[in-house]
Amino acid sequence: MKHKRFKQEKREAILGWSFILPATAAFVVFMFWPLIYTFYLSFFKWNMVSPNKQQVGLKNYIDLLTSPLTYQLLWNTLIFVAILICLNFVLPYILAYINTFVMNKGKGIYKTLLFIPSLISLVVGAISLQFIFNPISGPIGTILRGFGITMPSWSKTAGLVILVISLVAVLKAFGYNFLVLLSGMSSVSPELIEAARLEKTPKRKIFSKIVMPLTSSTAIYVLIISVVQGMQYVFTPTKVLTQGGPNHQSSNIIYGVYEEAFTYYSTGRASALSIMAMLIFLILLFLEFKYVERGIYYEN
């Protein structure tokens, strides 16, 4: 009897491993091995063409840590993250609440209108916003001239160039984040909201004291993808519109890795910068789990 049970357990174990082996192999090949090889390359000087790699030890890391450009990229990255959190997390969170608990008519229309921009590709969105914000022939510049205001050239203005590039990522991710948060709002009991209304609780308190705690698990997911996926999305408009200019004012740590590798062909520095970027995101993820995850409500 024990022998049969052992054989059955072994068969089930083999079957289980056979199911997870393809996904595990893909994860190792496309995630772990590139990470290990990137870490290995960060200790070399190599241009991706020469058959020989020159070992330089920690020089790539030291050069990056002593370069003012690295801190410029980090500062720009923080600005990108702040804008993406505000426009891809906070704003759709508020609009999802309004659509679910405040609006009485036209909910489906607004859902559709807010989701449609996410169907536009990043390249098309970048070119469209380039036209919209054109200070000479764009609609915004034309309207401002009617009020006697001259619109600055956004592609040459520090701060404004980051905002415009971020808007392309917002167009792509806003609709998806809005629908995800909307689905989280649907799990909140309408009876609970109605009871709060009967007690004449202000809408802002209903949002902060009832809706936010009960939808916190959905919110933390959207917060994480707003940062991680948003930083991936800003790469394309940066490449299409500014190539990191003017004077690296629109670049960020992700585009900096690409520029080091495929513009300057400095594979070692690019690898070191990518490892530094990964460490920064791991620190942010650790802080999220340590200080934010504790307050998350998971149903059941």
Image (cartoon, rainbow, N blue to C red):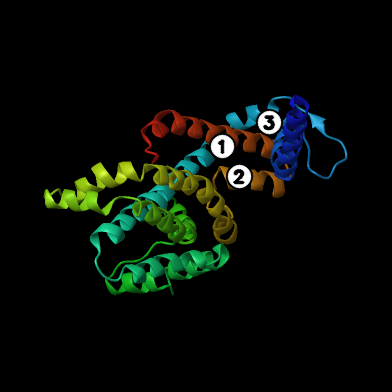
Q: Is residue 47 left or right of residue 67?
A: right
Q: Position of residue 49 (x, y in %)?
A: 83, 45
Q: Nearer the viewer, residue 169 or 94?
A: 94
284 vs 84: above or below: above
Q: Quadrant of the N terminus?
A: top right
The answer to whether residue 140 of the structure is visible from this angle is yes
Gap in angstroms between the C-alphas marked 2 and 3? 14 Å
For mark 3, what is the residue?
Answer: 60
58 vs 22: above or below: above
**Residue placed farthest to the right in the image?**
51
Q: Is residue 95 left or right of residue 76?
A: left
Q: Residue at x 31, y 53 (%)?
A: 94
Q: Residue at x 67, y 44 (%)?
A: 260
Q: Residue at x 46, y 31 (%)?
A: 289
Q: Residue at x 59, y 48 (%)?
A: 255
Residues at discs 1 and 2 in contact (Cβ within 8 Å): yes
**Residue placed farthest to the front in the image?**
1
Q: Position of residue 86 (x, y in %)?
A: 37, 49
Q: Residues within 10 Å of mark 2 (few under 14, many from 20)?
A: many
For mark 2, what is the residue?
Answer: 256
